[in-house]
Amino acid sequence: MRVPAKIVSIKRETPTVKSFEFDLGDNSLGFKPGQWVDFFVRIDGVETVGGYSITSSPARQDRIGLAIKLGGDNPVPHFLHNRARVGDRVEMQVGGDFYYTSDMAGSIVLLAGGIGITPLMSMMRYVDEGAPGVDALLVHSAGSPSELLFRDELREMVAGNERLRYAATVTGPTDEPWDGATGRIDREMLERSGVDLRAIFFISGPPSMIPDMRRLLAGMGVPEDRIRYEQWW
């Protein structure tokens, strides 16, 4: 079922990503952390749809957060980045079976590539705010330091919650200041980050990342039934 929503805030997060907060009024999508929405908006009189993962915690169901990367052929991200304003109205419909709730496991490991961090950010916020018995590790890789979406918030979140851990790595050459890890996520990085091999693993990122991470985890002894993944392109 579609739900009407109104843009209440727009924020530049990285050179290519903006975050949007939507007020659903008295409505609720009833979403779980990790799910996505079909996003409907009229552009020049024509209804257009895009699919985007929810970044906000389900603790508050009357507000939805999305982080949208500019690019591709779909006109929706171009509209949102270049023309959308606070007060604009759209519609949403929730979907997807990639999600986490605390009854599934007491420990999760979240492996993100680029903008693939978006559904995993919802999971981290959920664990931080509403799952006191759960431990979570999020490992994020991006092409440059400036594209490490939510980096400052995650650092603050981890500093205030001993059950949460966060690690980041930069995969591409960059002129930006960076003294952290470089290269793709690998076994050494996971072990250095204190990975819990008994956890449920969630992978979200570009197509090449999914099989790479599945092979990596299998080589570390993680059974296939504890590996979940999401990809869109």
Image (cartoon, rainbow, N blue to C red):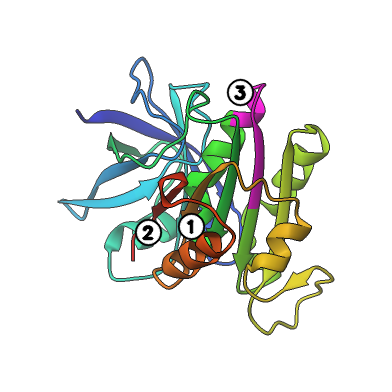
Name the residue that disc number 1 marks.
Answer: 116
**Residues tagged 2 and 1 counted as in contact (Cβ below 8 A):** yes
| On-image quarter of the N terminus | top left
**Residues tagged 2 and 3 counted as in contact (Cβ below 8 A):** no
Which SS class for mark 2? loop
Residue drawn at 27 percent across, 44 percent down: 38
| On-image quarter of the C terminus | bottom left
Determine whether 167 is above or below 210 in the image.
above
Q: Earlier in the sequence, mark 2 or mark 3?
A: 3
Observer-nearest of 61 and 116: 116
Real-space Cα separation, disc 2 to disc 1, in angstroms: 8 Å
Q: Residue furthest top?
A: 26
Q: Is residue 190 left or right of residue 92?
A: right
Which SS class for mark 1? helix
Q: Earlier in the sequence, mark 2 or mark 1?
A: 1
Real-space Cα separation, disc 2 to disc 3, in angstroms: 25 Å
Q: Quadrant of residue 162?
A: top right
Observer-nearest of 173 and 192: 192
Q: Is residue 137 magenta?
A: yes
- Where residue 88 appears, as percent x and y from the top left, is 36, 39
Name the residue that disc number 2 marks.
Answer: 231
Residue drawn at 62 percent across, 48 percent down: 197
Q: Amino acid at mark 1?
A: Gly
Magenta range is 127-138
Q: Earlier in the sequence, mark 1 or mark 3?
A: 1
Name the residue that disc number 3 marks.
Answer: 131
Q: Residues within 10 Å of mark 3 (few under 14, many from 20)?
A: some
